[in-house]
Image (cartoon, helix red, strand yellow):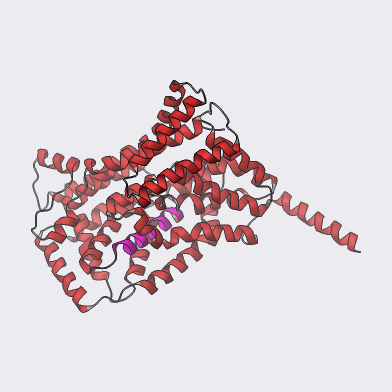
Amino acid sequence: MYRIKPEQMPSLSEAIFVIAAIIAIMSVSIIYFEAPPHIPLAISLLLLIIYGMIKKVPYEKLQAGFSEGAVSGMGAVFLFFMIGILIASWIYSGTIPTLIYGGFELVTPNFYYAIVFIITSLVGICVGSSLTTVATVGLAFIGISQALDISLAITAGSVVSGAFFGDKMSPISDTTNMASSILKVDLFEHIRNMMWTTVPAFLIALVIFGIISPSISNANFGEMELYQQGLLDTGLIHWYNAVVPLAVLVIFSIFKAPALLTLAAGALSAIVISIFHTIPSIGGLFGILFGGYVSETGIEQIDSLLTRGGMESMFFTIALILLALGMGGLLFKLGIVPTIFESAERMFQSVKSVIIGTAINAIGVNVLIGEQYLSILLTTETFQPQYQKLGLENKNLSRVSEDAGTVVNPLVPWSVCGVFIASVLDVPTLEYLPFAFFCLLCPVLTIIFGITGKTLTYTNTAIVDQAEFESVDESKMG
């Protein structure tokens, strides 16, 4: 059942103690001591190795455990390298500066955060990738917020909310296709069923973003005009700089090209466009793609925003991902996660408890392992037998796994998405977390619907059984 075979199965109390210790180490280190998450992850990994050796698990087996866990992230590693290249090329070519300049034109005195949420949602649906949306349009809105001197944390929260709404509801999203295909649910049936929780979460978040949006003053607009002029002075602002690379991303996404190739095509199109206003040296271009773009306009705010990207900028993120996934591999090899999963299977027998358990499981995998794909995979594998026993259709499980799996990952400081977003937007995860309203609402709504039984669908067999049960009850009453 499990990708990494456990070498032992500890007692439930022992497994819970180990998990609690790891969560305590991570939480205290990051929240109280404000340490980079790498250090508590490394400490937790070493403590797990010591625990395994005390339990007489051979070191070679432990090494294989964290190696297998880290290997599962190699796809993400190459993807992040390409996103680093994409960001550098999109700044160098003028794509991101043009998006920022165009975004200024959309700014109104009111409802700014709501506008950010709507636009990132639309782009997320079109592109089908939350991280790509964050790294492009999201980064542009962070620049606008810096110019307007308004909250970067709330801006990041609205960007993350919109990006993950788009990722969750896009038919070309990896997570959406994964959740539906694992359970053999029609893709568009899965998306339609998710609307029961996703649409209310979107509308509530939209209202909140509208209410908390600042009233942008004339002084802000004056600062914004200076910012726009500074962008124009770079010589990078041309409509085609934004339209062509975005169109390339959307076209490749529509044709379901692999994400790595889609990002590469987006970067290449930007580099080709850059020739129209800059003739780069090959060596200089390679240096930008590796080390990132360095802005030298002399305007501090613009230079701060545009100096970023490159493969090198992803090293922090990649190191953290490998540590987190390595720790996750050890948790499986030592039987800690399997023990908790199997106990959960025995505990959740009613419809309410199964829905709640599914959501808790998906959230727990994100917190412990930090990987949204594993969150979906392990949750569906663990709970599918329970759903079948209770006569619940698979589309219920696929919905809950996304409601509490896909959108929770960016809220965990040491997760794949959380680390990436904090690195790209330069806003710590714990700062934008309280404002990622859409991501916070989805698991809450899916649990509420599970408790009330609303919007849940049953197999024909379950419906017949229920009808027979009700007819027997009526005959007894008669």
| Residue nearest the observer in this picture, 140 or 265 | 140
User: What residue span does the magenta drawing correspond to?
Assistant: 149-168
x then y, percent, for residue 224: 18, 70
Residue furthest out toward the right:
478
| Residue nearest the observer in this picture, 208 or 46 | 46
Q: Is residue 356 above or below residue 322?
A: below
Q: Residue at horizontal 36%, vertical 60%?
A: 157
User: Residue 158: within the magenta?
Assistant: yes
Q: Residue at horizontal 45%, vertical 64%?
A: 202
| Image quarter (top left, top right, bottom left or bottom right) of the C terminus | bottom right
Task: Please indicate whether residue 400 sits to the left or right of residue 263 in the image.
Answer: right
Q: Does the rendering let one see residue 346?
A: yes
Q: Is residue 208 above or below residue 334?
A: below
x then y, percent, for residue 61: 46, 23
User: Residue 212: within the magenta?
Assistant: no
x then y, percent, for residue 450: 61, 57
Q: Residue at horizontal 24%, vertical 54%?
A: 244
| Image quarter (top left, top right, bottom left or bottom right) of the N terminus | top right
| Residue nearest the observer in this picture, 219 or 76 | 219
Residue furthest out toward the bottom:
218
Task: Please indicate whether residue 436 sits to the left or right of residue 284 in the image.
Answer: right
x then y, percent, for residue 425: 28, 54
